[in-house]
Amino acid sequence: MMEPWQIRAIHAASALAAKAHDGQFRDDGVTLYIIHPARVAGLVTVFGGGYTEVIAAWLHDVIEDCSHGETTVAYGLSSFCLPGDDAITVYQIVKALTKDKSIEEEQRLQESLARINAAPPGATLVKICDRLDNVLDAVKGREDRQKYLKDTDVLLSTLYGRAVESGYTEAHEVLRVTTLLAAKGISGS
């Protein structure tokens, strides 16, 4: 059970994310983008993430996809008045999940996964939940879906040890099975 102040901080993060992603849509061009962070935050909650991981889930794409995203996240976190180093932890998770677009695309996944493994453990859970939502939602419409599923296999093998060590085995297993089912659905069509 979360404390009221934690719930307020999560609500503030969801409002910040909604404002930052205003006017953005998922790849289908119809679904509001904010639906994705909302689902990721829900999955993080289902798989046992704490309030810092839920906040990070709401904010996980702001730096990458929004103008002035890094400033938005930094100032937003400072306004949440989180105790101790919690704001720093959330920021580290969000930064670890932000793709470095200056790196060649072929190297980007491995570099990203290395950053996630070096970040606070919650980054692993948020990334698994992010990928799970994308596999459930977006993979069917992706032109590069087979590559995306292969990349998901790489993600699963790279993050396995961290997921087990951090108590996120169930989330990892759900992503693994979902990816297998998605691949069967693709090969069967």
Image (cartoon, rainbow, N blue to C red):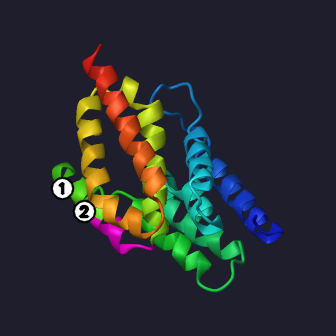
Q: Which residue is mark 1?
A: 107
Is residue 125 part of the magenta span, yes or no? no
* Left or right of residue 144, residue 171 in this image: right
* Left or right of residue 131, residue 7 in this image: right
SS at badge 1: helix
Query: Quick check: can you spot residue 144?
Result: no
Residue 111 image label: 2
Q: Position of residue 112 (x, y in %)?
A: 30, 60
Above or below 166: residue 22 = above
Q: Position of residue 157 (x, y in %)?
A: 26, 54
Q: Residue at x 49, y 57 (%)?
A: 126
Instruction: Tell me which segment is drawn in magenta.
Output: 114-120
- Nearer the observer, 157 or 24: 157
Q: Amino acid at mark 2?
A: Glu
Is residue 118 part of the magenta span, yes or no? yes
Q: How many marks?
A: 2
- Nearer the observer, 97 or 118: 118
Q: Amino acid at mark 1?
A: Gln
Decide: marks 2, 1 in contact (CB < 8 A)? yes
